C-alpha cells in the first residue's frame, strides 16, 4: 500500500503539472524545477551518485518483485463445503479450538 500511495501521489502531481503546463500555469514553482533541471543536466551517467541511485532502485524493484511472487502467511484457514458458492474461513487459533471441541 505504501508503494501504491507513493506512486499515486507522484503520478497525480505529474499529471497536474502536465495539465497546468498546457494552460501556461505551474503546479510546482518554476524556481524549484529550474534548480532540479540544472542539477540533472550537470550529472553524468558515470557519476557515483547516479550509479548508486540506480543500484538502489534496482534493489528496491527486486524486493518488491520478490514480495509479489513469494506467498505470504495466511491468517485464515479456508473451509470448503459441498456448496461451491459458499466459503468460510477460521483463524488458526479458532480452527484449533474447533478441532479440540470436535475431538472432545
Image (cartoon, rainbow, N blue to C red):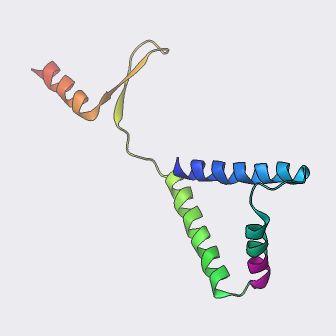
Q: How far from the left and from the top, in percent, is residue 25? A: 85, 53
Image-based side of 7 in relation to 21, left or right = left
Residue 91 image-quadrant placement: top left
Image-based side of 8 in relation to 98, left or right = right
Image height of 12 relative to 37, above or below: above
Image height of 71 relative to 51, above or below: above
Q: How far from the left and from the top, in percent, is residue 104? A: 9, 20
Residue 98 image-quadrant placement: top left
Determine if the magenta segment contains residue 31: no
Determine if the magenta segment contains residue 41: yes
Q: 84 or 23, which lies in front?
A: 23
Image-based side of 90 in relation to 25, left or right = left
Please give the name of the residue rendered at 56% of the width and 57% of the height, measured from the top-left corner.
Answer: 65
Q: 34 or 85, which lies in front?
A: 34
Please give the name of the residue rendered at 38% of the width and 21% of the height, measured from the top-left corner.
Answer: 88
* Residue lying furthest left: 104
Please state the extent of the stretch shown in magenta in the rendering.
38-44
Amino acid at each position: 500500500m505504501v508503494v501504491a500511495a507513493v506512486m499515486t501521489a507522484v503520478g497525480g502531481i505529474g499529471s497536474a503539472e502536465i495539465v497546468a503546463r498546457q494552460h501556461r500555469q505551474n503546479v510546482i514553482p518554476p524556481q524549484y524545477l529550474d534548480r532540479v533541471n540544472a542539477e540533472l543536466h550537470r550529472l553524468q551517467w558515470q557519476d557515483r551518485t547516479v550509479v548508486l541511485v540506480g543500484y538502489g532502485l534496482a534493489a528496491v524493484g527486486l524486493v518488491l518483485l520478490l514480495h509479489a511472487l513469494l506467498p505470504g502467511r495466511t491468517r485464515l484457514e479456508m473451509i470448503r463445503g459441498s456448496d461451491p458458492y459458499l466459503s468460510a474461513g477460521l483463524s488458526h487459533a479458532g480452527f484449533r479450538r474447533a478441532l479440540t471441541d470436535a475431538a472432545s
